[in-house]
Amino acid sequence: MTDTAAPARRLLQGSEAIAEAMIAAGCRFFSGYPMTPFTEVLEHMARLLPGVGGICMNAESELEAVGMAWGAAATGTPAATGSTGQGLSLMQESLAEITLARLPLVVLDMARAQGDYYQATRGGGHGDYRHLVLAPADSAEAVTLIGLAFDLAERWRNPVLVMGDYYLAHTARSVTIPGPVDRAVPAWGLDGSSGGTGRAKLISFLGSAKQRDDVGYDLAAHYADCAAHTSTMAHAVKPLAEVTDTEDAEVVVVAFGTPARYVQAAVRELRSEGLAVGTVRPITLYPFPTEAVARAADGARVVAVYENNQGQMVDDVRLAVLGRAPVEFIGGLSLDSSGFGIAPDLDVRVLKERISRVVAS
Amino acid sequence: MTGFVPTDRPPSAPARLVDDFTPALIDVGAHHLCPGCGEPVAMRSALEAVDELGLTRRAIAVFGIGCYTAFSNNLDVEVLQALHGRAPSVATGVKRARPDSIVFTVQGDGDMVSEGLQEVLHTAARGESVTCIMLNNGVFGETGGHMSAATVVGQRTKTSLEGRDPDLHGRPILLASLLAHVDGAAYVARGLVNSAGNVARTKKMLLRAFEAQERRAGFSFVEILTMCPTGWFVETEEAPGYLEDNLAAVHTPGVLKDEVDR
Ligand SMILES: Cc1ncc(C[n+]2csc(CCOP(=O)(O)OP(=O)(O)O)c2C)c(N)n1
Ligand code: SF4
Ligand SMILES: [Mg+2]
């Protein structure tokens, strides 16, 4: 028997689930330029947005994509853009300055493997700023985190990155798309109407203070404000992590995104074979769940980090563990020939072996 | 009083403001652009056009990066600051999200032709209902007088000390001429601000460009040749003539396309 009142569960490909979740979260402007595994999100947005009165732009490059999203965001329209790491590299100049202009924006970072962890979590562009970064491990969680991303972007007037990958984009799963969220147009949004009032709005990464003499912008004051805002945001946003079996764990394995699901499966098997292993899966990559990692590391003999790269998040894990236990990197580059980061070592047997080796050493 | 003003001693009366020429939509008359710069004249003309067409309560200006950026926090119209070269895509996002607004960009030749050429081309090709205004002085004024993609052959800049040499530096892109060939562009004109008469003609172009946008005729573009005595390394009073003889001889002024009534 089915409960007719409950929102329907539907079998959706990850990209489609992300697109539907964005629209449910109130997104009304999307711009993008195709690149795997971001492409299908763009296709679905192009199909779905007009139906809800939204706009999807086929940008002529990632430079235009982020520019268009910037313009729409400045009107207070809930906006998003995205690409893979390569496209995001092109967007970085804008992503940096959008942050200093204090604009909300959701950015899909549909990465290839996990080599873009630094790019996502360190700001990626020039200057002193941070983006909030969320890393779902599957499409069901992506749906929830997309909603959170729009909430956080609106609340903090700061870009929020949602990191996905090839698996997330292309794996079909049964998900529940939440009901639509209505977002009020913010008072700061541009629409032209404040012109001629003597207090016309200004949205600028150089500062929002109007010139009252001939001094130009007060960059020092603006940058100090932005730094204070980043710090407040970083402390106020709750770091999220999924922690399993760490109480008695001798070995704690840390992994994020899709690969974390494989790690969790390997660890479950190792547990059933009698090994005292636990996992921490950071869900927010910025702010990093430092406390959750530190707590798990307390009493552990070793902390292992699995990522599909040469070792990037491992830095954050080391900072969190802070000498409580040795930190070993057990990941590696995704060396598949497709270039999409399929990661052939995402194999429970391989992972079990690597974890066991760390235990033995 | 007749005769001449003695300058060998302090004035007998303190200076006083005879009239405030600050136009309606510029908050503060003072700016830190160079004496003899053409950009404040162009900026003023654009704002007068907005004011005269009654668009003040709907206008949103999107600024690029160059000397003109000094005006971006000094106006009584809404302003969105964009990056160097990127204003057309940002303006596109604004206009699509707020179709009832009147959106115009303010960019330079370095900004629009060198750094961001593809932005303005695609925006024109889309027939985007925005107006792009390019202040063309043939140099990067802001960085101190460097060669841009619009610098004319023979023009001396800090990075073409012997003058722009076509064999070494290539030839300038004549942006208005290029955009006139793009289908999505409904209005394309090139004016200049080196004399009162030319300022008046340029103002008419700006009025027509905004009219094109208001009537959703397509993309509209006004290139304005402006004096940059500092970046040209010429005397302030020689700049209007230099503009006429050098820049305007290559970037020829006039209305290149008007399909507003089509
Ligand atoms: C990405 C980037 N590259 C370089 C600069 C440095 N820069 C600032 S203004 C400018 C040139 C401005 O030239 P133009 O647009 O013609 O304006 P003008 O100063 O001549 O009015 C340059 C190169 C920048 N701000 N951003
Ligand atoms: S450098 Fe040139 S463009 Fe810049 S303010 Fe001076 S005269 Fe004007
Ligand atoms: Mg210039």
Image: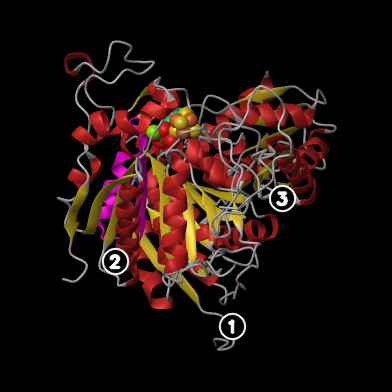
- Say which quadrant the C terminus of chain A sits in: top right
Say if the magenta span includes residue B92.
no
Disc 2 residue type? Answer: Ala
Residue toward you, A241 or A153:
A153
- Residue A3 horizontal side relative to residue A54, left or right: right
- Circle 3 is placed at which residue position? A240
Residue A256 occupies quadrant = top right
- Circle 1 is placed at which residue position? A6
Residue B94, image x, y percentages: 45, 61
Residue A223 occupies quadrant = top right
The magenta segment is: B115-138
Question: Mark 3 to mark 2: distance in Å?
Answer: 52 Å
Q: Secondary structure at mark 2?
A: helix
Q: Is residue A69 visible?
A: yes
- Say which quadrant the N terminus of chain A sits in: bottom right
Q: Is residue A171 visible?
A: no
